[in-house]
Amino acid sequence: MVAHWIRGLATLIFLPLLAQASSEKIMLWPTGSGQTRPGPSVVMTTQGKVTQVNAPFLTLYSPRTFNGKTVLIAAGGGYRRIEQAKEALPAAQFLTQHGFRAYILTYRLPNSHWPEGKDVAMQDVRQALTLIHQDNPHLSVLGFSAGAHLLALAINRTDVIPKDDKASPTVEDMALIYPIISVEPPFNHSATHRVLAGRHASRQEEAKWSVQYAIHDHSPPLFVVESEDDPIAPPQNGLLLHRAATQHHVPMKWIRYATGGHGFGLGRKGMANSAWPEHYLSWLNQLPAHN
């Protein structure tokens, strides 16, 4: 009964947002494997926040006319929840309206005591990329807050990519929206720091979970959006990322708004940050694609 209630609630919340797109649920791991647990796939609030994941999955939204490009979306929530209704669903709606395939990732939360430890969400990203890339060679990613942090680490940290993985999925670009980049002081106040590094983390552990150290010469081009008054991911995060991108000759389009705070999704009505999705669309459309 609980599983049916969850699915019904998700339909009520999400269906109006994506009326123009067909959807398909794709499990990341086989049922009964070490990457799944008994019970409903997810536990979700009435506001569309995922608070528990027992079986991670992708939700594919397909446009009426496909333009040849695909985007994997990861919402944030400080690794304690996933803001699907606030961030991922509006982004998927926007992208499908413009011809993109959109996959929303529902990833395991590292604070849920999985045997694999704190790397579980990154393992889910790598598995998702492998599954998606089979039929979607032109693949981009879009992450919000901790979801941006997750995607950037999973794609760029070489220690999470198997050494014998010669066919590792290629991501053409990364869009990071009000991203958590560093969990080192003075940016060690976030939920991301508390969940991944821990309250009494060493500097080495904090560096391990800081995105700027993961950027390398072959990292995909970056699209970054921030607010100067963001109290959770201050714009110095973007500066650290920009320095790393410059050092490794990685192209980075960087948009900073004077106001907007944190967690503004696709932008707040009447505010300057509501323009970023159109800038993102223009940036995406500069990439080559083939049906």
Image: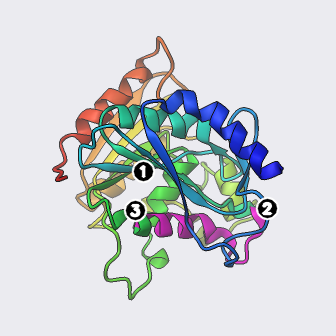
Of callouts 3 and 1, which one flags the residue occurring earlier in the amino acid sequence?
Answer: 3
Pointer 2 and pointer 1: residues touching (CB < 8 Å)? no
Instruction: Provide residue 236's location: percent of width, then percent of height.
Output: 47, 42
The mark nearer the N terminus, 2 or 1, is 2
Asked if residue 231 can be seen in this view, the reply is no
Dot 3 amino acid type: Ile
Secondary structure type for disc 3: helix
Q: For the view shown, which residue lies furthest in the top direction?
A: 270
Distance of label 3 from label 1 (alpha carbons):
30 Å
Can residue 271 be seen by looking at this rendering? yes
Q: Is residue 113 magenta?
A: yes
Nearer to us in this view, 248 or 286:
286
Q: Determine whether 87 is above or below 156 in the image.
A: above
Residue at image mark 1: 240
Q: Position of residue 278 (x, y in %)?
A: 31, 27
What residue sits 76% from the left and 59% below the top? 199
Question: Looking at the rendered structure, which numbered label has been put on residue 132?
Answer: 3
* Numbered badge on residue 84: none
For the record, the magenta segment spans 112-129
Q: Which residue is mark 2?
A: 39
Q: Position of residue 88 (x, y in %)?
A: 53, 40
Question: Which element type, helix, strand or loop, lies under badge 2?
Answer: loop
Decide which of tag 3 and tag 2 comes sooner along the chain. Answer: 2
